[in-house]
Amino acid sequence: MAHQRAYRAAVDGKRRGNSASREVYALLVIRRLLIAAAVLFSASLSSSASHAQHAPFAGMAGTWAGGGTVTLDDGSKERIRCRASYAVAGPNMDLTLTCASDSYKFNLQASVVDQGGAVSGNWTESSRNIGGSLEGRGGGGNFDVVASAAGFNANISLRTAGNRQSIAMRADSQFRAANISLSR
């Protein structure tokens, strides 16, 4: 009879000392759930960070400054000072690049969108009142695009590495080339 009572108590969870072991078991379950939640949370953060690093305009947002040279159509070169500002929102980016020397200035603005590595958009250069389209390829802060307008074409190569950026422009108009190094 005592044996049957012990059996029933064990089945019903009413055995002596069992309430303490249930509490320990519950704490173990809670601990495992918390660890699993922490692991999932960490994995989602690293996945988001990894995705952000591979975004088309990764590492470009913000304000940059530096200088370089511009080669004019007569072959002369001038040193220029430049500021760039990038506003990035996912696959979209707005850019403003202003460069000036003692006798030369340009103010380039562009809005571009990335679609799987293909970059396209529009640009304007306000000091000469011209504008056109941008087409090219790139990602991860590195791009090769062609800026086109009536009577104007320029190849633009932009490379971003950490807090450094280089911009090389080759054109068939008033200025032949510009080489710019920026940092933030």
Image (tube, rainbow, N blue to C red):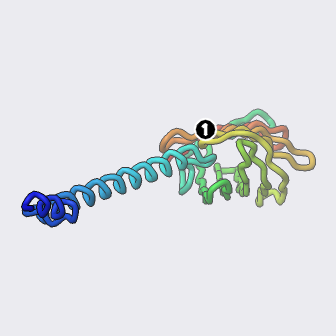
Q: Nearer the viewer, residue 123 or 136?
A: 136
Which residue, as the protein is rendered here, is positioned at the far right? 150
Which residue, as the protein is rendered here, is positioned at the far top? 75
Q: Which residue is mark 1?
A: 159
Q: Position of residue 25 (x, y in %)?
A: 20, 57
Residue 8, above or below 167: below
At a point 78% along the width and 53% down the height, the residue shown is 121
Q: Position of residue 3 (x, y in %)?
A: 10, 57
At a point 36% along the width and 56% down the height, the residue shown is 37
Q: Nearer the viewer, residue 165 or 81?
A: 165
Q: Nearer the viewer, residue 6 or 86?
A: 6
Which residue, as the protein is rendered here, is positioned at the far front? 1
Q: Secondary structure at mark 1?
A: strand
135 relative to 101 in the view: left or right: right
Which quarter of the picture shows residue 108? bottom right
Residue 99 visible in rendering: yes
At a point 15% along the width and 66% down the height, the residue shown is 14
Q: Position of residue 158 (x, y in %)?
A: 65, 40
Residue 119, above or below 4: above
Q: Looking at the picture, which amino acid does disc 1 mark?
A: Arg
109 relative to 38 in the view: left or right: right
Local packing at callout 1 (Cα closer than 10 Å; few below 14, some 14-19, many 20+) is some
145 relative to 3 in the view: left or right: right
